Amino acid sequence: QKEVEQDPGPLSVPEGAIVSLNCTYSNSAFQYFMWYRQYSRKGPELLMYTYSSGNKEDGRFTAQVDKSSKYISLFIRDSQPSDSATYLCAMSDSGGSNYKLTFGKGTLLTVNP
Amino acid sequence: GEEVAQTPKHLVRGEGQKAKLYCAPIKGHSYVFWYQQVLKNEFKFLISFQNENVFDETGMPKERFSAKCLPNSPCSLEIQATKLEDSAVYFCASSQFQDQPQHFGDGTRLSIL
């Protein structure tokens, strides 16, 4: 079993839809949770960064962390064609892993105009 | 600078040749991380630095891979005697402190022929 599981999709939605992306993880030591967006031939771009359980909102993006269930989510409201990309969850802990990131496999999202 | 700068964008080498990749972290960032992305989104951690000191090298293949971060120079990742399996995109990321989010460059695509 991989440490971080993420449904690879692909996910196709119409413009304006609410998108829900999820990751589960097995390592209870993970404390830092990130969502990155990666366009083709580009590097991962940080979208959201959370440390604790709960919700964090930034514009059209909301990140949720549920440490008791080892489950994180990213919601995109009013999705736009420019949101079409691969979305990667990533996480790290402070102790044994020395802050290196463990990534999910990424979910490919297409938002259709 | 305000972005992580990686050079070159694309590097082609014959099997057995040497490859050297460069990374300039964001100005003021003390931590540099190298990752290898293979097989569509599988990220593998290689090595991290705190300024010019190795912070964590648990992901580095010992035999052919080496890396440095020297003062007033871009960080570098060098692969000796390249193999076909080294073909991948190599990403560099930097963070201000170890528990802060990592910001990625656009990667170097290494093709071994």
Image (cartoon, coloured by chain):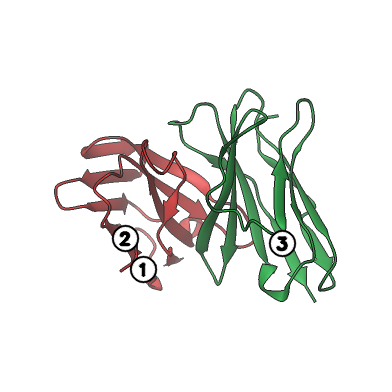
Chain colours: A red, B green
Q: Is residue A80 visible?
A: no
Say above or below: B4 vs A105.
Answer: above
**Cα distance in 3D space between marks 1 and 2:** 6 Å
Q: Are marks 1 and 2 in contact (CB under 8 Å)?
A: yes
Residue at the extreme front:
B63
Could you say whether the residue bearing mark 1 is in a helix, strand or loop?
Answer: strand
Q: Name the foreground residue: B17 vs A58.
A: B17
Quadrant (top left, top right, bottom left, bottom right) of the N terminus of chain A? bottom left
The amino acid beneath tag 3 is Arg
Say above or below: B25 vs A113.
Answer: above
Q: Percent from the top left, x then y, of residue A57?
A: 30, 37
Give the crowd class for mark 2: few <14, some 14-19, many >=20 residues within 10 Å: some
Q: Residue beneath label 2, please? A: A17
Provide the chain ID for the residue under circle 1: A
- Residue found 48% across the figure and 61% down from its top: A86
Q: Residue beneath label 3, please? A: B109
- Residue found 83% across the figure and 70% down from its top: B16
Q: Are marks 3 and 2 in contact (CB under 8 Å)?
A: no
Could you say whether the residue bearing mark 3 is in a helix, strand or loop?
Answer: strand
Q: Name the foreground residue: B23 vs A56.
A: B23
Give the crowd class for mark 3: few <14, some 14-19, many >=20 residues within 10 Å: many
**Which quadrant of the figure has residue B113?**
bottom right
**Cα distance in 3D space between marks 3 and 2:** 34 Å
Q: Residue beneath label 1, please? A: A13
- Would residue A26 appear left or right of B40 to someone viewing this image? left
Nearer the camera: disc 3 or disc 2: 3
